[in-house]
């Protein structure tokens, strides 16, 4: 037996239950992995409250690092003792050990520690596809990154700067502004003190930015559109403040023939080849020093409910790791 976080109804953090589970033996194409570190992401809040419904009862958690304990029939890429990490697949990372399809797991290279890997996979792969494929940032571009002190935001800002962009970030406090500055932002706007739209227009001398990376959602959406230059791209990849209202295509035309997309990591890593290419790009950037992981806080895995409370209250900075 092992322990895991599960829930059998949608609701607040109080629905999360810490108790014994039996992972069992891996079947065809499966691995049993023992986790050493688990990442925390806002998508798990969406799943817990039912915004992104999952079949109940359910486990929770999208990304983790650990060691392969056992391999099922047909698995040739991994063996017991291998260091691995993952950032996709069925929910269930909030566990001491679990079963997971082998094709959702990647080998973890030397030089990347388990805690960093646990919070790199989903957030790092998200940053990779956003910067390289959704809108391929080029030298000289100007980008706006909302929640620039958060887990995805710090990675986006560092990597965009490394690619030669001018990076403008938003943050909600002096402390978070300092974190954003330290992780790649040339300019940081404290949105509680001043209008981020006015400040972006001032910084860009009225031109606006090439792209907005917005994981906040409803609270920043309209303002983000006003920050874009003609033919700019609005990338809405999260709903931390709530879901965005319906978008009127004519409104995009009036604002300068803007592009709008709502991407998902799963669509960018559907095939094994895409997953391996995405993680190779990510790991190479980390090993080259282009991006560094900022772990802002850790919690025992058993205290996942408190971690959710702090995440929803925006009391966390950088990435959060849950420790089995």
Image (tube, grey):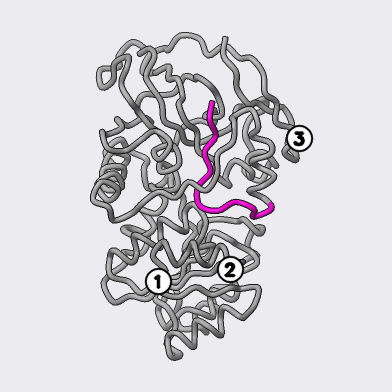
Question: Which mark sits nearer the N-terminus, 2 or 1?
Answer: 1
Indicate whether residue 147 is drawn in magenta. Answer: no
Query: Residue 174: x percent and y percent?
Result: 58, 68
Of residues 96 and 91, the one drawn nearer to the viewer in this rendering = 96
**Quarter assignment of residue 134:** bottom left
Instruction: Find numbered disc 2 in the image and state the secondary structure of the residue it sits on.
Output: helix
The residue carrying mark 2 is 174
Of residues 141 and 101, the one drawn nearer to the viewer in this rendering = 141
Q: For the point 26% across and 48% down, which residue is it?
A: 281
Of residues 288 and 2, the one drawn nearer to the viewer in this rendering = 288
Can you tell which mark lies on residue 14?
3
Instruction: Find numbered disc 3 in the image and state the secondary structure of the residue it sits on.
Output: helix
Q: In this view, does 174 lie to the left or right of 7?
A: left
Q: In which quarter of the image is the N terminus?
A: top right
Query: Residue 209: x percent and y percent?
Result: 42, 78
Q: For the point 33% across and 66% down, which residue is it?
A: 161
């Amino acid at each position: 037996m092992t322990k895991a976080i599960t829930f059998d109804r949608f609701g607040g953090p109080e629905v999360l239950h810490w108790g014994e589970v039996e992972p069992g033996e891996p079947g065809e194409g499966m691995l049993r992995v023992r986790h050493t570190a688990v990442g925390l992401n806002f998508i798990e809040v969406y799943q817990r409250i039912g915004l992104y419904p999952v079949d109940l009862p359910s486990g929770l958690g999208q990304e983790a690092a650990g060691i392969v304990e056992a391999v099922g029939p047909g698995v040739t890429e991994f063996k017991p003792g291998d260091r691995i990490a993952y950032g996709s697949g069925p929910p269930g990372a909030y566990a001491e050990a679990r079963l997971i399809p082998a094709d959702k797991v990647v080998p973890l290279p030397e030089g990347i520690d388990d805690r960093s890997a646990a919070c790199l996979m989903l957030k790092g792969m998200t940053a990779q596809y956003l910067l390289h494929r959704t809108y391929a940032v080029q030298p000289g571009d100007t980008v706006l990154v909302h929640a620039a002190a958060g887990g995805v935001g710090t990675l986006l800002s560092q990597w965009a700067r490394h690619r030669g962009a001018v990076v403008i970030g938003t943050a909600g406090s002096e402390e978070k502004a300092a974190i954003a500055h330290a992780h790649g932002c040339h300019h940081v706007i404290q949105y509680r003190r001043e209008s981020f739209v006015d400040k972006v227009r001032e910084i860009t001398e009225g031109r606006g930015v090439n792209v907005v990376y917005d994981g906040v959602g409803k609270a920043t959406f309209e303002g983000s559109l006003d920050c874009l230059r003609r033919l700019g791209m609005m990338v809405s990849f999260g709903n931390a403040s709530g879901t965005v209202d319906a978008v009127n295509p004519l409104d995009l035309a009036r604002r300068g023939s803007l592009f709008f997309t709502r991407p998902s990591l799963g669509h960018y890593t559907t095939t094994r080849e895409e997953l391996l290419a995405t993680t190779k790009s990510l790991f190479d950037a980390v090993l080259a020093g282009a991006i560094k992981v900022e772990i802002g806080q850790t919690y025992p895995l058993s205290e996942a409910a408190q971690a959710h409370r702090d995440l929803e209250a925006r009391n966390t900075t950088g990435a959060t790791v849950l420790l089995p």
